[in-house]
Amino acid sequence: MLDELEDGPWPSFVSGIKRLRDAHGDARVGGMANDLLGQLEHSYETRKGYWKGGTVSVFGYGGGIIPRFSEVGGEFPDSKEFHTLRVQPPAGNFYSTDILRRLADSWEKWGSGLVTFHGQTGNIMFIGASTENTQHFFDEINEYGFDLGGAGPCVRTGMSCVGSARCEQSCTNEHRLHRELVNNFTDDIHRPALPYKFKFKISGCPNDCTNSIERADFAVIGSWRDDIKIDHDAFAEYLSAKGRRHVIDNIITRCPTNCITLTDDDQLEIDNRNCVKCMHCLNVIPKALSPGDDKGVTVLIGGKRTLKVGDLMGTVVVPFMKLDTSEDYERIVELAEEVIDFWAENGLEHERCGEMIERIGLVNFLEGIGVDVDPNMVAHPRESSYVRMDGWDEEAAKWFARKRQAKRQAKDADDAQRDGDAAAADASKTKSADAPAHIAVTVTESP
């Protein structure tokens, strides 16, 4: 039956495993691949899965390995233990060819030779090792700098896009933030102690190449809050090469808020106030359009795929914050700590952070993590079906009242300062007027 999976125009994983079995020089690797195919064929014939879980770990770690034991190990002994090791990749998934060769050599030495770069978890997936060899493989790759990723109810492996190293749209230092978060939560990655999984994903711009908004409990998106920069000469060159019709059909009419205009004299104008940063125009003409200079990040909480409730997009919790100084990075790490601590205390078993927010309400969640409700968290709430609006009007009224109070206090402080300056000036004038005139007196001695 497996032969049927090799038919058709698409690449087949069966062909890949057969090639590994037949061409690899190590008999142990070939035997694992052959028995893996044998068990898979048996599963298709009986319409039943034969993998079961268990407990496998390396010294000092409570996660990072997905155990797989075969229930038909007697028939297929070489693949009776086929555990998967999740290994954290470098930030941005940047590797040297030397490191890739070392990883491949280590895995062929201790595992099956099957590797995935990278799963939606963000990890390098080393698929197929015996219980004994998981420790040997981990020890070897740990010596040259690699560590296990998360598996189970813990903080999972973080992901970041290629970022400013290769992309002109980048609005932040994705790789530094990735490392700051991973280094801070390393203990939570290796020792599961949370209600369920918690994922960090960082994208350098609203293109969101890591799929963080719909996949991450804590999504960080690079953004900007000033105007899109326009290189009019580069746009004129593009317009001359492609034609006016092309620009109108492929850029102007595809703006979701109609905020971009081609004038009669072929100039590009953008109503930045109505721009929702969909990135379409910047992607089409990156030489002519680029993000503004006032760059930072937006933080969204609660994205996930289907579990107890349906898919959830992340909800904006921090509309914009700068990430320029070490203090800025400390602030965002502290926010992540507050979110995880609140969720760990209030989340139900097997409940993602977004599902907890759905259950208790966004306002209660924001109060729990110490973040004030801000109407700027969502630009158009009625158009955002994934945001619960329980008590939103009341909280928005409180927000505006705080703003008015702060403005009134600032005005009172300015008035008091001016009154104090005026009183000091009047006192100085009065003192000068009341002071006695200096009279010169000459004293002579009597004869």
Image (cartoon, rainbow, N blue to C red):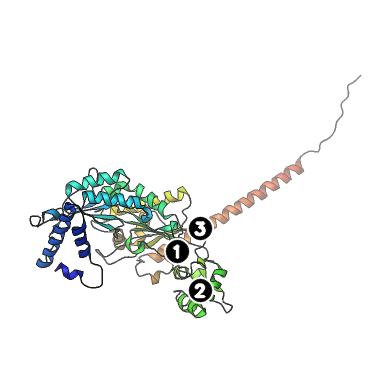
Residue 149 appears in view:
no
> Does the magenta-highlighted stretch encompass residue 303?
yes
Please give left or right for residue 198 compared with residue 23 in the image.
right
- In this view, the mark in front (1 or 2): 2
Q: Which mark is residue 376?
A: 1
Please name the residue that numbered disc 2 is placed on: 260
Looking at the image, which residue is at 21% across and 55% down?
Answer: 24
Amino acid at circle 1: Asn
Quadrant occupied by the N terminus: bottom left
Q: Give the residue number, with chain letter if any, for mark 3.
A: 405
> Residue 322's x, y, as percent?
47, 55
What residue appears at the point 12 percent right and 61 percent down from the top-left corner? 38
**Quadrant assignment for the C terminus:** top right
Separation of residues labelled 1 and 3 (CA atoms): 19 Å
Q: Would you say residue 395 is visible in this rendering?
A: yes
Cα distance in 3D space between marks 2 and 3: 38 Å
Callout 1 touching callout 3 (CB < 8 Å): no
Residue 348 falls within the magenta-colored stretch:
no
User: Which span is picked out in magenta?
Assistant: 302-311
